[in-house]
Amino acid sequence: MNELLPVFEWQQHVIAPWTTGLKSTLWIVLMGFFVATACGLLGNYLILRRMALVGDAISHSVLAGIGVAVVLALQLDTVTLFIAALAAGMVTTLIIEIIHRYTRVKQDAAIGIAFTSLFALGVILVSIKSGKVHIDTECVLYGEVALVPLENFKLSLTPALAGVIDKLPMSEVYLRGNELVMAPDVVRMGFVALAVALLIWVFYKELLVSSFDPALAFSLGINATFVHYALMALLSVVVVSAFESVGAILVVAMLILPGATAHLLSVRLPVILALTVLHAALGTLLGFHLATWLNCSIAGAFVVAGMALFLLAWLLSPHDGLLAQWHRRRNLKLEPPEEISRTPRARN
Amino acid sequence: MRHLPFIAGFCLLAAAMPAWADRIGDISETSVIEQAKRFFSFRDPSVRYALIGSILLGISCGLMGGFIVVRKMALFGDTLSHAVLPGVALGFLWNMEKDPVAIFIGATLAGLLGGAMVALIRQTTRLKEDTALGIVLASFFAVGICLLTRIQKMPGNKGGLDEFLFGSAASIGRSDIILMAVVTGLAVLLVGLFYKELLVTSFDAAFARAAGFPVNIINYALTLLLAFSVVVALRAVGVVLVSAMLITPAAAAYLLTDRMHRLLGLAALFGLISGVMGAFISFLTTNIPTGPLMVMAATMVFALAFFFGPRHGVLMRWWRQKSRSARVQRENTLKAVYHVLEAREFDGEGVSLRELAERRRETLDEARAQSDALCKHHMATLHDDGDAIHLTPEGWQRACEIVRNHRLWELYLTNEAHIAPDHVHEDAEIIEHVLGEETVRELERALNHATRDPHGRAIPGLADLTSGSTPFGPPETVTGYASR
């Protein structure tokens, strides 16, 4: 077991990544944070709408879209991936709908059949072509966040602007002379996270009302079906951008864990959204150091750290936590009021 | 019906052949038939183990899948199957080798822990079931991934642990087979012994509780059996896709039968077919993991049941619906012919297509098409160069029956349900096609064998039905509506 848990060294596992290995640390942590934020913010609405497992289904079936793109020998650039993901998401929704409507198979089984089939198809297609593309079956499962720091996104700046940026913290990582050098995946994911946050901010009311009270949304003239499909489309886009770094299954944790943790701590949606971002940041940081310490999958460690935060919230949440519940129950008087226990139950 | 999946399976196999042909050629210089012979002849030990393993996993997954599909626990099965991964890794760590028993124990414990955590989250928080399932699924899986990647970087024998992710039937060894056989046998035995208890708790938990069944214990036992079948399938299908082997064959069986014991049998059979087909195709190819191939085979079986199932299949239902609406259409034409004859007080036998078209407010072509349909079903014959139709005795009888059903129902609604006479037509228009003889007798008795409908028109009686094509003349008595 000693081999499993190496000795924890503060200097080597906490300080060193931020000094000598700053470049890769920064990009990996930023990537994790962007993925967890984009997924977590969106995941809040999945949780509210009881669609958490639809996120699971879509994240699995995106692989079929990628597989088809790989077999057609398309360049796996951003646009192709987004189109493939959108198509796969739509096909999944369609298959679930068809099985559910035309047979007596219940919705849960329909979801199960749809996403496992598409995932299996995706794995087969990717395996056939493996060796020729950079996606392999393990990357499918838990991603390759360690490959993120490959910097080939360069942007020339005017000297004045470069001077301003030079004042920012850790500028030695992304500034070389007058050139801005960045990891393209991180930039893309950052844009996606920003887009998700913006969309939620702009359509806050519509999302809120249609998630909590579809009938009220209808009477206010909000098209709930459109909101639903827009959410699904956004989900597909987020899932596919997160796919390469965290893989198909861990994305589910990224979608659900931050929101679920926040839901244990608050009942106000704005607070929940803020807590989601906090969970994303903490989980990513802790997870990164966990992975550095144990030398294991970084994406997996992100999720394990997020799970630890969830367990903490579950245990210690001021109102809904297990300890608070236990405390309340202990202080509860267990004698029923006299008049209730004596009155015979009315019959009709 | 049971042969259909077999036939379809071989068709699929045959269709898949050309695509793999060049690949097979790469491995060895034999034909597909030779390969199939070698696969099914039990000659190579590793192939033998793969085949037996697929059969066992198909049976155990199908059996348990039947229960989770009728209990709407499909996604619970998915969660359980992902949650066993840390247990697999810990079982491997026990003495750093792929010891089937250690992995079996670790995986079962992890699965049960995952199931318990789902229940606990639901009981103690406001989070809903889907969220609880998602949390457990992804978190346990992440712990497993961390452990696996950690193990891969440790010194020592660590080969092939990633086979547990997507499955590899070829790596099944003798000790795996023994374990799989024991666990599958145990599962079959338990399901056989406690069939009644499992059945009753699956379909009506409240009744089971009232009848004194220990529902909670049975549910825990079912979770344990489910974990068993997941672990049995682990080696060949892999953690990620085990749930498909649970859900898909059972869902296909669910489309074909209404009886639970038949459903379980069919599900086990479908699981077996999918398992063997997947193992066979992976035997023919080099670098495709077994799990996805088995799942695709299961999906094919489901698709066949979805389209061609005799009772719930989409094509069959479409066909039934089409023939039913064609029958209603024919009966409406017969009724129109009757009305035309009635309007001229049954003077003369033939009805011209023009009269028919006017009666139904249709074009002449439509009337012609409908009379052709009647002729095809021997209910009428065409006369006068195809411009007029005469009803045959069967056609006349059916026309009388429809008109009788319609008017009896109108009378019944007016007399017994006290609905205004001008509101009863629409309802009767629908029910006339589905009233059976028994119901008609009852209606006649309830209405004292009335002969007039609420609008004063004659209700055809038994004599008219059996008289071939004899019209029953002008109205004489008025009893029905007047008797109110």
Image (cartoon, coloured by chain):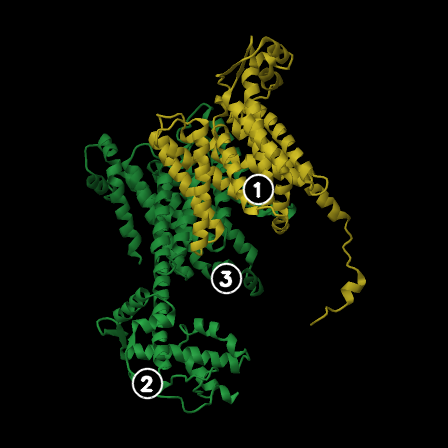
Chain colours: A yellow, B green
- The residue under label 2 is which amino acid type? Pro
Reading the chain from its start, which is encountered first: label 2 or label 3? 3
Question: Which residue corresponds to the image point at 44% horizontal and 46% vertical from the top-left?
Answer: A94
Please tell me whether mark 3 sits on a helix, a strand or a loop.
helix
- Tell me the mark number nearer the camera, choosing from 2 and 1: 2
* In-front residue for pair B348/B67: B348
* Residue for badge 1: A46
The image shows residue A285, relative to residue B236, as above or below, that is above
Question: Which residue corresponds to the image point at 37% horizontal and 26% vertical from the top-left?
Answer: A133
Task: Point out residue B96 in the picture as x, y percentages from the top left corner.
Answer: 45, 30
Please tell me whether mark 2 sits on a helix, a strand or a loop.
loop
Horizontal side of residue A83 vs B10, given as left or right:
right
The image shows residue A254, relative to residue B273, as above or below, that is above
Measure the alpha-carbon separation of dots 3 and 1.
34 Å
- The residue under label 1 is which amino acid type? Leu
Q: How many marks?
A: 3
Question: Which residue corresponds to the image point at 37% horizontal and 48% vertical from the top-left?
Answer: B58
- Tell me the mark number nearer the camera, choosing from 2 and 3: 2
Circles 3 and 1 on the same subunit: no
Q: Quadrant of residue A49?
A: top right
Please tell me whether mark 1 sits on a helix, a strand or a loop.
helix
Label 3: how many residues lie within 10 Å, few (<14), some (14-19) or many (20+)?
some
* Residue for badge 3: B200
Q: Quadrant of the N terminus of chain B?
A: bottom left
- Tell me the mark number nearer the camera, choosing from 3 and 1: 1
Q: Is residue B87 visible?
A: yes
Is the C-beta separation of discs 2 and 3 under 8 Å?
A: no
Q: Is residue A36 visible?
A: no
